Image: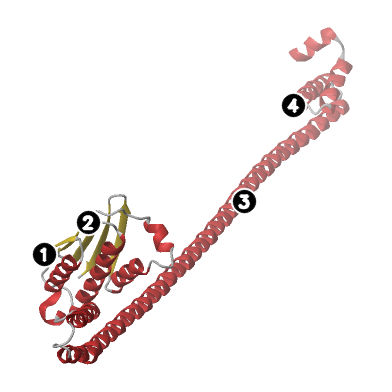
Amino acid sequence: MCHFEKYKTLSNESKIARLAADMERYKIFVTAKYYYDLLSQNAKTKGNLRQALFYNEKLMSLNDSIQANNAKGKLFDLQAKYDSEKKQQQIILQQTTISMKNFYIAFLMSALCLLLLGFLFYQQKQQKFELKQQNSSQLNFSQQLLQQTEEDRKRIAADLHDSVSHELISLKKSIDNNSGGLQERVDDILEEIRSITRSLSPVLFDNVGLQITIEQMVERVQQHNNFILTADINYNNSLSRAHELQIYRILQEAVTNMVKYSQAIAGKITITEDAQNVHIEVKDNGRGFDVAKTLQNGKAFGLHNIIERSRAISGVANIKSSLGGTIINIVVKK
């Protein structure tokens, strides 16, 4: 009643009704309800039941609107919550999908890398196998070639000794009473034949071994050439006779090149061994030469012969040369 009296001082009942209607129109339902409640109580006080009923209906309508708004608000909140959860689920699903895609991509890339590495490994292994087969075939060929060469050397040496040498000895005996000059010539021929046969097949090599055969070669070189050649050999016969013979052939080739081409006055042969390898060194104090250029020259048969013979007995030859001398180092596995 006091509220109504306050508004009565400002205006009349119709003004309150307009305010209530405005609040209702602008959906300010709580305030509108408050005004309609005042109007209803005022109508009851005045005994205007019809007007009181009208305002009560307004109050009931406002209550319905308020409840509807509350329900709508709850529905909106629920919808908003549902939309939020749905959006969150979509985000999670998208993230999961992206993660799975990334996983599949990473898996495929890893599988591809493994396949590529496997292919490269197989290819490399295949190349190594083919190279090993090729080297093995080349080594077998070299060994067979060297073996055949040695057999040919022995046969030629035997033929020279058994036929030509005997013939010359007979000739020498038949002319003992004739010209001394002819006899000296025959002696020279015999010595040359002996030198050739020793070169082709070292006398008693299988019996005396590598060291004595080398020492005999050193002695002959110094006897027939103005050249100082020494040998320092510390070797315990740890290689096969076939390998020793190839080492002797290598030394023959090296010493021949030294005497013919190096313009050296001295040379040395050194042979040592350890638990795994036999080490061979041949050096001189000559003028030296360009190793790479000489090896490219098709006429460098001697150097190629040294390298190939070394390879045939599982060895490695290293040739160094400069002004002042040449050094040939060979390492042969036991």
Which residue is at 25% across, 73% downward? 249
First in residue order: circle 2 vs circle 3: 3
Which is more toward the observer, 199 or 114? 199
First in residue order: circle 4 vs circle 2: 4
Q: Nearer the viewer, mark 4 or mark 2?
A: 2
Instruction: Name the element at disc 2.
Output: loop
Label 2 environment density (alpha carbons within 10 Å; few <14, some 14–19, many ≥20): some
Indicate the quadrant containing the C terminus: top left, top right, bottom left or bottom right. Answer: bottom left
- Amino acid carrying label 4: it is Val
Instruction: Name the element at disc 1.
Output: loop
Label 1 environment density (alpha carbons within 10 Å; few <14, some 14–19, many ≥20): few
Q: Which mark is residue 234?
A: 1
- Amino acid carrying label 3: it is Gln
Label 4 environment density (alpha carbons within 10 Å; few <14, some 14–19, many ≥20): some
Q: Nearer the viewer, mark 2 or mark 1?
A: 2
Image location (x, y in percent) of residue 269: 18, 62
- Amino acid carrying label 2: it is Ile
Please give left or right for residue 311 compared with residue 26 in the image.
Answer: left
Q: Which mark is residue 265?
A: 2
Please give left or right for residue 64 compared with residue 86 in the image.
Answer: right
- Amino acid carrying label 1: it is Asn
Q: Which residue is mark 4?
A: 30
First in residue order: circle 4 vs circle 1: 4
Q: CA distance from mark 3 to mark 4?
A: 45 Å
Q: Which mark is residue 112?
A: none
State if disc 1 and disc 3 touch (CB < 8 Å).
no
Which is more toward the observer, 135 or 5? 135
Q: Which mark is residue 94?
A: 3
Q: CA distance from mark 3 to mark 1?
A: 81 Å
